[in-house]
Amino acid sequence: MTKALRRTQVLLALAALGAAGMFLGPDGWYGIDIGPVGSAVLYAALWLFVIHLSRYSGEVFPESWSPAEKQAWVALVFTTLVTFHVANLLLPLPDLGAEADQLRNSATRPLWINLGMLIFGWIVIGSMVRKQDAGAVQLDERDLRIAHRASRFADGALALLIIWLVVALVTLPDQSRTWLRPLIAANVLIALLIARTLVENIYTVWRYRRERA
Amino acid sequence: MSEFAVRNRIREFRMLNAAMTQAALAEACGVTRQTIIALEAEKYSPSLELAFKLARALQRNLEEVFQYAEK
């Protein structure tokens, strides 16, 4: 394993640690709020990864990965982070009551900013990875076939998720439905679409690994 | 009942073809080197068009490069 690849793994581990602190960390741990600390660690790791990518172009990912597989991994990392964000966005909404129907409510405002930063980071890192393989074939028939299979698999998963949601809503007793406001329902539908993309990316990287094994 | 699969001799013919590299073959066929690796490991079966391109790049007939044989 090359030095650059080892650094990539360290940065990824750091980002995972930061994300865990950001999403799952306790609010008060020896007087420290772990959420902002985790957030700072995550964004620092992503920023260092951008520098690392610009310095060690071509060595950051394993040589056996095709350009499309690299993009699939970048997409998986960011989709996972976005999924956690959206889950964090949804969880406090039922407690807000009527305020949940406002797009800019107190519970979700900081999360929208983080979400925007993550999407910006995804665009930057994705375009840098693409530049690494400039001139080479970016996408061939094998990549397209894997993408097609992943899309079909994710569509199946989305259908199951929608059925599960419908059954859950229908079987909920009336008094338990009071939290279900229009904007919460809209956010849940967006969350389902994000979950579909996450399933698609997981399937894609799994398929690449399987074809290499 | 016996199972059939697409087998290939890409690696063998590549070596006979002045030790053509995987990268050179990939470039000649317009695919990534990783696809050539997957083909040689028989983890992936190519489309008919790619199979013809591979046979042409290796200067062989299609039937020489690919066989539909028992696993």
Image: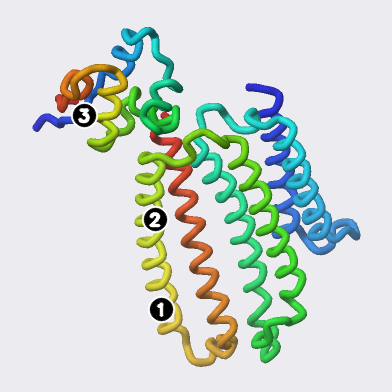
What numbered label is drawn on residue A151? 2
Q: Give the answer, above or below, for where A111 lies relative to A169.
A: above
Residue identifier under label 3: B6
Residue identifier under label 1: A166
Among all residues in the image, which is located at the extreme right?
A31
On whether disc 2 and disc 3 are found on a single subunit, the reply is no
Q: Dot 1, crowdedness within 10 Å: few (<14), some or many (≥20)?
A: few
Q: Indicate the quadrant containing the C terminus of chain A: top left, top right, bottom left or bottom right.
A: top left
Image point (43%, 21%), residue name: B24
Instruction: State the image coordinates of residue A164 (x, y, percent, origin top left).
Output: 41, 72
Compared across the picture, whether A91 is left or right of B26 comes to: right
Q: Dot 3, crowdedness within 10 Å: few (<14), some or many (≥20)?
A: some
Instruction: State the image coordinates of residue B62 (x, y, percent, origin top left).
Output: 19, 24
Q: Name which residue type carries label 2.
A: Ser
Parent chain of label 2: A
Spatial CA distance of label 2 from label 3 is: 25 Å
Frontmost residue, B16 versus A151 = B16
Image point (39%, 78%), residue name: A167
Q: Give the answer, above or below, for where A28 lies relative to A162.
A: above
Under circle 1, the secondary element is helix
Parent chain of label 3: B
Under circle 3, the secondary element is strand
Q: Dot 2, crowdedness within 10 Å: few (<14), some or many (≥20)?
A: some
Compared across the picture, whether A177 is left or right of B56 comes to: right
